[in-house]
Image (cartoon, rainbow, N blue to C red):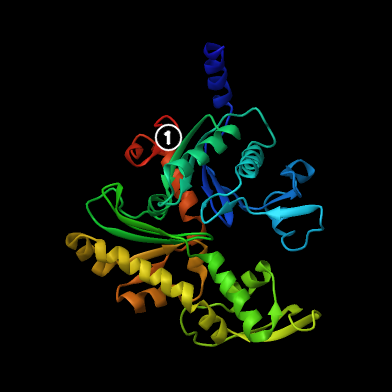
Amino acid sequence: MASFLKPLEWVLGNFSVDMGIDLGTANTLVCVRGRGIILNEPSVVAVKRGTNEVLLDGMAVGNAAKAMLGKTPGSIEAIRPLRHGVIADFEVTEKMLRYFISKVHDGKRWVKPQIVISVPTGITDVERRAVVHSAERAGARRVFLIDEPMAAGIGIDLPVTEAQGSLIVDIGGGTSEIAVLALAGSVVATSLRVAGDDFDEAIVNHMRRFHNLMIGEQTAERIKITIGSAFPMEQELSMDVKGRDTITGLPARAAVTSIEIREALQGPVRKICEAIRGVLEETPPEISADLVDTGCTIVGGGALLHGIAAAVSDFLGVPARIDSDPLTAVARGTGVFLEKLDVFSKVLSSDDDG
């Protein structure tokens, strides 16, 4: 039976589109060789409560499911199957991956693609195997894992294969990945479970404490995007926020300024800056010398927080810049790995390794 399956998988593989996947806590991006980023959707799935059965045969995955967050009736639950960059719900993650793989292949269900998936630096071997097995059960022919900082470094064309140090900071939804890269490896790296979700949580707590207003995570995200900042702005902003009054229980609104939101975000921003400093303190002197001029490059959704580069530079005393397309850096890197698997094999691990 096994001898029959191998040629069958080879045939199915030839009709499949190999892909790189940035499997993030907040969003999942898919990059296809020669076509670039072809899918970018929230890592959210709507299921029947208590069953893990995806609604409408996968129609409530991604954008459709995120629109349901905080608004579902009792029989439906919109969930995020990844927390802090790792799989929290294996069954739902598998179904989400199956949906994305099928969508890339225009609904075909018999495909067997080869997949490169980015993962946080600090996850355990058990968590890495969970990602591999979920992807295999979702239909992957072969699965490679690559650490997010390395994928991001390749995606933004840093000289990661050379004898020169590069500092990358990837602020995602669930984790912030910080690494000094050189000679196709991580010299020093850390994975901090403080990131975009913590920005949102800080805003939710601020609104409840100082405005007696309960808001949901989608509203907190809108506040962050609209008036959130990590460093003083040239022109401070304000906006009206709607939610539920914690005292009366009735719908209410409050005027909020960018100054108070910046104060609310100080905690998580400082933790990220301190983690970057910790990595720099462990960096060998010769590589530290490289970083005096090059500084760090910030990618991920958190890079879009206004003033984050200025805050990092002010805290550390080294240059900091935002990549021109920070949201897709990791996904673009997985695409490059697909094209150069032989070149980068030393920094990849696959299901064949264990």
Whole-percent x, y for residue 344 in the image = 35, 40
Q: Nearer the viewer, residue 245 or 334?
A: 245
Whole-percent x, y for residue 8 in the image = 57, 18
Residue at the (46%, 45%) spot, across then down: 334
Labels in figure, total: 1
Q: Is residue 164 left or right of residue 299?
A: left
Label 1 packing within 10 angstroms: few (<14), some (14-19), many (20+): some
Whole-percent x, y for residue 79 in the image = 67, 54
Observer able to see residue 226: no
Secondary structure of residue under mark 1: strand
* Residue at mark 1: 350
Residue at the (55%, 26%) spot, across then down: 13
Q: Is residue 14 left or right of residue 350?
A: right
- Quarter of the image that includes the N terminus: top right
Callout 1 amino acid: Ser
Q: Is residue 190 left or right of residue 109?
A: left
